[in-house]
Image (spheres, rainbow, N blue to C red):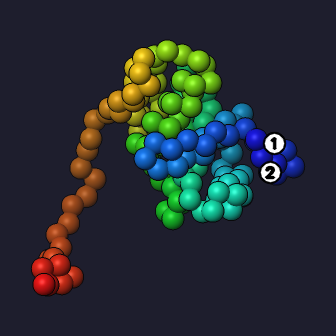
């Protein structure tokens, strides 16, 4: 728990290749996000991604704020962190979660060994071209 906005917020810190602070919220209120993210970043040396999670009728809704980027539409390690925390809190042996982000839904399955498998369709959102020589990439 940490004190924030004249109240206490429950969160779990988890490392799934990158560190995430998974916060459970009664409401996903946009106006409060930046202050809470700032508080958590400060508390953890600007080294955490922050997820806000609300469970509604077996649906897990989430918003994610990645360190250095701000709010993003979805996050694979964030979905994995959320699923792993819920698995832990519910003391489940195995589980299968659909994590709904503004950018789409990611599925995370956790097996009896606590391995997580992340799946969902991928889609091309943009493409580009760079010339590596412009960056002296091949310079010896």
Mark 2 closeness class: few <14, some 14–19, many ≥20 residues within 10 Å? few
The front one of 81 and 114 is 114
Residue 32: percent from the left, percent from the top? 72, 52
Q: Is residue 89 above or below residue 104?
A: above
Q: Which residue bears the numbered disc 2?
A: 4
**Which residue is found at the position 55% from the left and 47% from the top?**
20
Q: Quadrant of the C terminus?
A: bottom left
Whole-percent x and y of residue 94? 45, 16
From what the image shows, is residue 109 above or below residue 63?
above
- Which quadrant of the figure has residue 51? top right
Q: Are marks 2 and 1 in contact (CB under 8 Å)?
A: yes
The local crowd at label 1, few if under 14, some if 14 to 19, many if 20 or more residues have their Cα within 10 Å, is: few
Q: Quadrant of residue 80?
A: top left
The residue at which mark 1 appears reads as: 8
For image coordinates 12% across by 79% down, the residue present is 138
Q: Nearer the viewer, residue 126 or 84?
A: 84
The residue depicted at 47 percent of the width and 50 percent of the height is: 18
């Amino acid at each position: 728990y940490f004190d924030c906005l004249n109240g206490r917020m429950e969160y779990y810190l988890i490392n799934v290749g990158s560190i995430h602070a998974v916060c459970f919220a009664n409401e996903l209120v946009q106006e409060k996000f930046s202050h809470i993210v700032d508080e958590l970043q400060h508390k953890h040396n600007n080294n955490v991604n922050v997820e806000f999670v609300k469970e509604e009728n077996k649906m897990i809704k989430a918003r994610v704020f990645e360190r250095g980027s701000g709010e993003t539409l979805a996050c694979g390690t964030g979905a994995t962190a959320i699923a792993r925390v819920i698995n832990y809190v519910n003391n489940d042996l195995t589980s299968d979660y659909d994590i709904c982000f503004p950018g789409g839904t990611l599925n995370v399955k956790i097996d009896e060994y606590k391995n997580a498998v992340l799946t969902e369709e991928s889609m091309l959102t943009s493409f580009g071209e760079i010339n590596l020589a412009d960056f002296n990439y091949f310079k010896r």
